[in-house]
Amino acid sequence: MAELNTKLWAGVEILSGKMDVSEYNNFLLGLIFYKYLSDQQLRAVYEEENGKVTEYPDRETQLAGLSEWHKEDADDVRQIMSTKLGYFIEPNYLFYTLQKQASNYEFQISDLQNAFIDLGRQGVQFTGLFDDVDLTSTKLGSNAQQRNVTISEVIKTLDEIDLFGHDGDVIGDAYEYLIGQFAAGAGKKAGEFYTPQAVSKIISEIVVIGQEDIAPFHVYDPAMGSGSLMLNIRQFVNNPSKVHYHGQELNTTTYNLARMNLILHNVEQAQMRLQNGDTLDEDWPTDEPYLFNAVVMNPPYSAVWSADPKFMGDARFEPYGKLAPKSKADFSFLLHGFYHLNEKGTMGIVLPHGVLFRGSAEGTIRKTLLAKGAICAVIGLPPNIFYGTSIPTVVLILKKGRENNGRDVLFIDASNDYEKQKNQNNLRPEDISKIIEAYKVRKNISKYAHLASYEEIASNDYNLNIPRYVDTFEEEEQIDIVALSREITGLNSKVKESETEFLSLLDQLAITDETRDIIEATKRIFIQEVQE
């Protein structure tokens, strides 16, 4: 992790001053992904010739083997690698080759551009994937030579990253680091595109409870951002290779980021079903709407949507009698996700606290959801844990078919359990475990959790504001007035004794006409300070 961050920062410094902060992501993440594809191909060729290995030689040796095979039969190596990996990068276009050229001042930016074009023609999974890495941008330099120099320096820096030695989500970790360093420049909405790993872990672990053995397991994120929230599911199922990922994202750049992320995690194309579109304006998917074992989501908070009356005839929203307000689409996202959940599945969604208590149309929707037993748990998170916003958020857990199995709601107040860091607050492993355990046991925990009956919630006019159910107030320690009075009296006696002793010492000093006034002034100041 430290190595990744160090090299990313070096890349940032190269691009600094040339483009906006938000554009760093496009270049750095795009190039990291291309490096991954290149280095993976080198390993795949070595395995093809030498069988499965636990340790690989240096890339110079790997490249020599590929070059020799390519020279002997270019069509053969391309066909075998395309079948095995789903793509093939010509030896002279590999990231390692480009790095060597850059180190020898021979790099030509047109080679990298051609490599992107060739890769984009090799399957739908690569189409348009590098569109945001604009190598012709004058922000890289006013002419081709300056752009060559800029990209050469970035390539040399990023090539030092050991992607296969990185423990975790490379794209997600890189993205989190970049927006963490430049949260302000990345825009106040940066947190929409990436859910911190701690929050992802909470949601992923909870929605899988009781479904660990299901295979294939279908997860859906209607506002998928970088895709990291979906990918966390594989940590908690017993058949991670059989997870199918379904996601939609409105922002094209972020949609491409999610595609890269899933490919980086070796997700087969047949298990990847991603859509670049508007989740609310047009329902998707429509062919198998109740497919999903889990729905996970961190949508944009209180976003604006059309709220057109036509949606009252939409199967996603019609049962609730009202549409979410035009200025606050929170419940629109929630109802969309809930609609696509299967009858035994679980949904986890991050939203602002306002969804718990706002009235009018949102109050009506909330009341209907509670009557259906849909809302299973309300988990209050600490403030300032998302990039780009410091507001506290809440995780809502929803299930279908609970009407006959109880309509109680578990409230967890985890807002005070976190580690304060420089820019963000952070949920520690013990904080996450505490939340998960409280969810599993589903009972009252003093000053932390409360299991509220439907009747109790109804008596609160269906208001789900957490402080109504979980009292975290800590009484201040009682002050013993009598003991305090005795203590003050004792201190006053000691002060008097010290005063008498000090004045006596002054009187014993040899006094001259020159020092008498100074000593008298000192006495007055001392007595005044003691009295005060």
Image: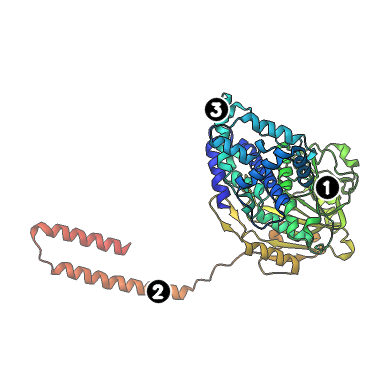
- Label 1 vs 2, first from the N-terminus: 1
Tell me the residue that label 2 is attached to: 487
* Whether label 1 touches label 2, CB < 8 Å: no
User: Residue 146, which numbered label?
Assistant: 3
Is any atom of residue 360 visible in this view? no
Residue that protrudes farthest toward the left in the picture: 512
* Whether label 3 touches label 1, CB < 8 Å: no
Mark 3 Cα-neighbour bin, 10 Å: few <14, some 14–19, many ≥20: some
User: Residue 270, which numbered label?
Assistant: 1
Q: Where is residue 99 in the image (x, y as percent from the top left)?
A: 58, 39
Q: Is mark 1 on a helix, strand or loop?
A: helix
Q: Residue at x 75, y 61 (%)?
A: 236
User: In the visual, does 17 lie left or right of 275?
Assistant: left
* Whether label 3 touches label 2, CB < 8 Å: no
For marks 1 and 2, give the one nearer the viewer: 1
Residue type at mark 1: give it. Ala
Quadrant of res 490: bottom left
Q: Residue at x 63, y 49 (%)?
A: 163
- Looking at this view, is 202 or 228 the one in front? 228
- Looking at this view, is 364 or 29 the one in front? 29
